[in-house]
Image (cartoon, rainbow, N blue to C red):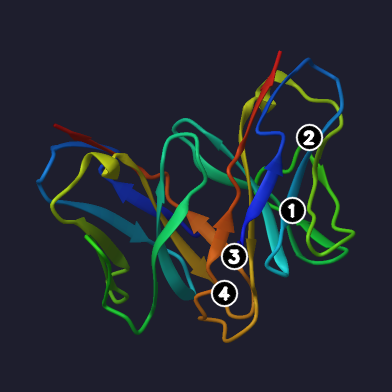
C-alpha cells in the first residue's frame, strides 16, 4: 500500500530536549516536505527536499533541521524544542516528473502531535 | 505575494443539504489547483486536482469548478452526510519547473443531523 508514515504519532517533551520525528514514504517520490498546522493559521511549510541531499527552507524554518540521506526518508529534527513549537506536524511526498502543470498529487502522512512543556 | 483566500471560515449545515465553499487565489504563474479534505487530527486527503484547462471536476458528491480568468474556484458538496464534517483546504501550485504550493487556511464544515 502506497503511504507516508510518521513516527511518533504523539510526543510530549520538555524544553531543550532534542527530538527527531521520522518520515518515510514507499512511493519512490523525489519531493518531500514538512508542514506544521496551528489553529487559525492553516498548513505552513517548514522545509522541503527536491531529492536526496537537496533541502531548502520553507516559510517557517526557524528552530528546525532536516536531512535527506535516502530517497525514502526525511526526518525532522528539533535541536532545542521550545513551547512555541507545540503543534501538529505533517510530512508529505510527491512525484515531480512530467509537465510543469502535471497533477503530481501530494500524499500526506497521518500527523505527529507534539507538545513541548 | 502568492495568496489563497477561502470563504467562509466555517459553515454549519443540516444533513442532506448542499453547500458551496469558495477559494480565491492570486498565485502566478498558475499550474493547478487542489481541494483537500482533512478530518480533525488527520492528514489531508486529495479530493480533486484541476489544471488551467479544466473547468469542472467531480469526485462522487464533490464537484470542483475553476475559473482561471477570475482566479476563483468552488467546491460544491451535494446531499451532505455527517461524514463530510471536516476542514476543506484549497491549495494552488505555482511555477513552471518548480513545485511551490500555496495553502488556504481552510473552511471548517460541520454537518449536523
Residue identified by numbered label 4: B95
Quadrant that contains the N terminus of chain A: bottom right
Comparing labels 1 and 4, the label whose residue is closer to the camera: 1
Against A51, is B79 above or below? above
Residue identified by numbered label 3: B100
SS category of the residue bearing label 1: strand
User: Chain for mark 3?
Assistant: B
Contact, mark 3 vs mark 4 (Cβ under 8 Å):
yes
Residue B78: in sight, yes or no?
yes
User: Chain for mark 4?
Assistant: B
Residue identified by numbered label 1: A24
Are tags 1 and 4 found on a single chain? no
User: Chain for mark 1?
Assistant: A
How far from the left and from the top, in percent, is residue B102? 51, 57
Are tags 2 and 4 found on a single chain? no
Against A4, is A53 above or below? below
Residue identified by numbered label 2: A63
Residue B77 location, quadrant: bottom left
Amino acid at each position: 500500500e502506497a503511504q507516508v508514515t510518521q513516527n511518533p504519532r504523539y510526543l510530549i517533551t520538555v524544553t531543550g530536549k532534542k527530538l527527531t520525528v521520522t518520515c518515510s514514504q514507499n512511493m519512490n517520490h523525489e519531493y518531500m516536505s514538512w508542514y506544521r498546522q496551528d489553529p487559525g493559521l492553516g498548513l505552513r511549510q517548514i522545509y522541503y527536499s527536491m531529492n536526496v541531499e537537496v533541502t531548502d527552507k520553507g516559510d517557517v524554518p526557524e528552530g528546525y533541521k532536516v536531512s535527506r540521506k535516502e530517497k525514502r526518508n526525511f526526518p525532522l529534527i528539533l535541536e532545542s524544542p521550545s513551547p512555541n513549537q507545540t503543534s501538529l506536524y505533517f510530512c508529505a511526498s510527491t512525484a515531480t516528473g512530467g509537465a510543469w502543470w502535471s497533477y503530481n498529487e501530494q500524499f500526506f502522512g497521518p500527523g505527529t502531535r507534539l507538545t513541548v512543556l | 505575494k502568492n495568496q489563497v483566500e477561502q470563504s467562509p471560515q466555517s459553515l454549519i449545515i443540516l444533513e442532506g443539504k448542499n453547500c458551496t465553499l469558495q477559494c480565491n487565489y492570486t498565485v502566478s504563474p498558475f499550474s493547478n489547483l487542489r481541494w483537500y479534505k482533512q478530518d480533525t487530527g488527520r492528514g489531508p486527503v486529495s479530493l480533486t486536482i484541476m489544471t488551467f484547462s479544466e473547468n469542472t471536476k467531480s469526485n462522487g458528491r464533490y464537484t470542483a469548478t475553476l475559473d482561471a480568468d477570475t482566479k476563483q474556484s468552488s467546491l460544491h458538496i451535494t446531499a451532505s452526510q455527517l461524514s463530510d464534517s471536516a476542514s476543506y483546504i484549497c491549495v494552488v501550485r505555482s511555477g513552471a519547473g518548480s513545485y511551490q504550493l500555496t495553502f488556504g487556511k481552510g473552511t471548517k464544515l460541520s454537518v449536523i443531523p
